[in-house]
Image (cartoon, rainbow, N blue to C red):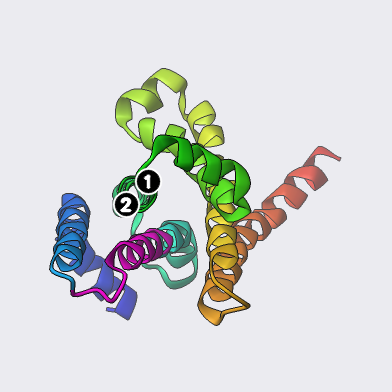
Amino acid sequence: MTLSDLINTGLRRIPPWTIYLASFAYAGWLLWLGIDNRVGADPVKALEHQLGEVALYLLVLGLAVSPLRRTLGINLLKFRRAIGLACFFFVACHLLVWAVLDVQRLDRVWADIVKRPYITVGMAAFVLLLPLAMTSNNVSVRKMGAAAWGKLHKLIYPAAILGAVHYVMLVKGWQVRPLVFLGVILGLIAWRYLSKLPSRQSATREIL
């Protein structure tokens, strides 16, 4: 038995709902640390950054599901929806902490979205993720049809890029971690496109 078989055997025993449980528990634990002043001198900013980073990790994991299955044989397909929804949950928490605890006023929230480019970019990513979260259920797949649903969910690619760019613009200077996130996300998206090229070229040759 290979290592990937062992990993897949272990993964089959884990239900997808554990992703939701772990996400709620971790977000609650972060909130408790913030209330208890154990996340640094500026707990609101620390919470914003922690929640945003977790969202980016889940975004990367969601994009890596297909590459992991095709290259290493590790199958995370049954977790993909839960990973995506957990990612949206942390993005929404990141946004709420910023709007409710940091900015605190609706007019200032809109002013920041309009005036600060990194917030504009982050909000654009959130808007693109909204329809994906709302249609991540079996009823939507049946009503829309698999093809239309699949096309809609390709919005994850621009949303992921905007999320990573938001992080790069947010920090001061050219820090390594945000650039690594951006590079990994661009690499995973490029992999998905390039991995389909041979089949497209074959199909073209067959038509000719």
The residue indicated by pointer 2 is: 97
Asked whether 69 falls inside the magenta stretch, the response is no
The residue indicated by pointer 1 is: 99
Residue at 39%, 65% in the rendered image: 53
| The magenta segment | 38-56
Residue at 35%, 45% in the rendered image: 104
Q: Quadrant of residue 131?
A: top left
Q: Quadrant of the N terminus?
A: bottom left
**Residue 68 location, x and y as percent?**
44, 66
> Horizontal placement of 123 versus 50: left or right?
right
Main secondary-structure element of the magenta-colored stretch? helix
Q: Is residue 2 visible?
A: no
Asked whether 54 falls inside the magenta stretch, the response is yes
Q: Secondary structure at mark 2?
A: helix
The residue type indicated by label 2 comes to: Val
| Image height of 169 relative to 92, above or below | below
Q: Is residue 17 visible?
A: yes
Please give the label number shown on residue 151. none
The extreme top residue here reads 143
**Residue 188 location, x and y as percent?**
56, 63
| Image height of 28 relative to 206, above or below | below
The residue type indicated by label 1 comes to: Ala
Q: In the rendered structure, are the residues bearing label 2 and label 1 in contact, judged by CB atoms less than 8 Å apart?
A: yes
Q: Quadrant of residue 9?
A: bottom left
* Classed neighbour count for the residue bearing mark 2: other residues with Cα under 10 Å, few (<14), some (14–19), many (≥20): many
Front position in the image: 76 or 107: 107
Q: Quadrant of the C terminus?
A: top right
Q: Secondary structure at mark 1?
A: helix
